[in-house]
Amino acid sequence: MLATVLHAPGDVRYEDVPEPVIQKPTDAIIKLSASCICGSDLWPYRGLNAVSQPLQMGHEYCGVVVAVGEAVKTVKPGQFVVGSFCLSDNTCPHCRHGFQSSCEQVEFMTGAQAPYARVPLADGTLVATDGMPDDDLIPSLLAVSDVLGTGWYAADAARVRPGSSVVVVGDGAVGLMGVLAAKQMGAERIIAMSRHKPRQALALEYGATHIVSERGAEGARVIKDLTGGVGADSVLECVGTQESMSQALESTRPGGSIGYVGVPHGVTFDGQQLFFAQRNMLGGPAPVRRFLPHLMDLVLRREIDPGKVFDLQIPIADVSEGYKAMDERRAIKTLLRV
């Protein structure tokens, strides 16, 4: 079959690869209903992560089960499923505490920018719908697999509560999903940090009450002005750079919380500064499996529409153009039609 392979920075090809097969009794094979490109895929594409050999790309997925291993009990061929980018057994102690992304058997999904994909640990990773969803819901169900689940985890980790003030650092897909999550969790003031008009508009649609385009010390000053000179109760860090983490720390009130989900590149901390800042911090790879049933239910009941974050939809054969569009910030997030 044809699938997306990254050979070197900037070199993405849609080319022949072996079709996935059951390798372990806990595997499932799914036929993708759609796939997409993640912001984290841009790190190796830009050369910021080493590419030592060709990589089959894609970790966000939803589709129909076509085969299962003999040990799989919770899903069966013909069912529509959504899974997390972190693969987990959902039974180990860490999973039972809600941190499936730290499962004792954790793996990370690969090869999902393709017509078919193998999903290890299928019982603990996949959640089936009661029936086939309407076609127009596929983008939103795909978003649940990672980008919405990650934005939701950022809000959860930042302890967003009804009536709270929230700042979202980062206006990419995850940041926009963080805005949506904060709104759903009842935040009263949601401040999106963005300099891009289309992203600002979507942030406002998802529930942002204020847009701040300033950065650094000036951005922190504006946020304090908007929060009565105090700083935000909750800050969602959705980028992963030193600048974004520093912005998050500077924008949070003492005793407030930071949920950080941007994959860190070059982020360091000053221990003395962190000690006296008195901020709560929790983050890392999102345990999407914890939230999957609830988020899928919100989508299926049409209470949320995270699929709007896909502002570019193209055939999967044109995947290289999708990477270019996101790299050049011509697209927030690219959906690949399979």
Image (spheres, rainbow, N blue to C red):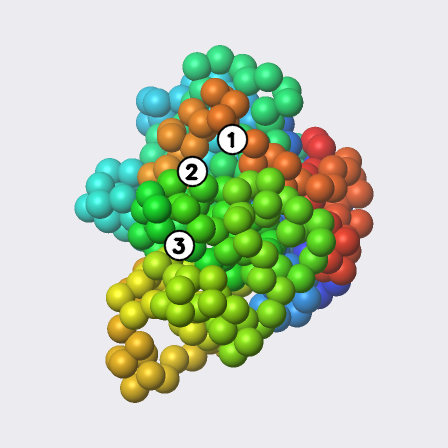
Circle 1 Cα neighbour tier, 10 Å, few/some/many (<14 / 14–19 / ≥20):
some
Instruction: Identify which residue is drawn at 51% across, 61% down.
Output: 169
Which residue is at the front of the view, 236 or 137? 236
Of callouts 1 and 2, which one flags the residue occurring earlier in the amino acid sequence? 2
**Three-letter amino acid code of the residue under disc 3:** Ser
The image quarter in which residue 72 lies: top left
Mark yes or no: residue 245 visible.
no
Q: Are marks 1 and 2 in contact (CB under 8 Å)?
A: yes
Circle 3 Cα neighbour tier, 10 Å, few/some/many (<14 / 14–19 / ≥20):
many
Which residue is at the front of the view, 232 or 106? 232
Of callouts 1 and 3, which one flags the residue occurring earlier in the amino acid sequence? 3
Q: Secondary structure at mark 3?
A: strand
Residue 221: assigned label: none
Q: Most extreme residue toward the left, as rendered? A: 93
**Mark 1 vs mark 2, CA separation in Å:** 9 Å
**Three-letter amino acid code of the residue under disc 2:** Gln
Residue 184: assigned label: 2
Mark 2 or mark 3, whichever is nearer to me: 3
Q: Secondary structure at mark 2?
A: helix
Residue 165: assigned label: 3
Tell me the quarter of the image containing the C terminus.
top right
**Three-letter amino acid code of the residue under disc 1:** Ile
Instruction: Identify which residue is drawn at 27% across, 44% down.
Output: 98
Instruction: Identify which residue is drawn at 56% across, 27% down.
Output: 63
Q: Most extreme residue toward the top, as rendered? A: 131
Which residue is at the front of the view, 114 or 296? 296
Tell me the quarter of the image containing the N terminus.
top right
Q: Is residue 150 above or below residue 255?
A: above
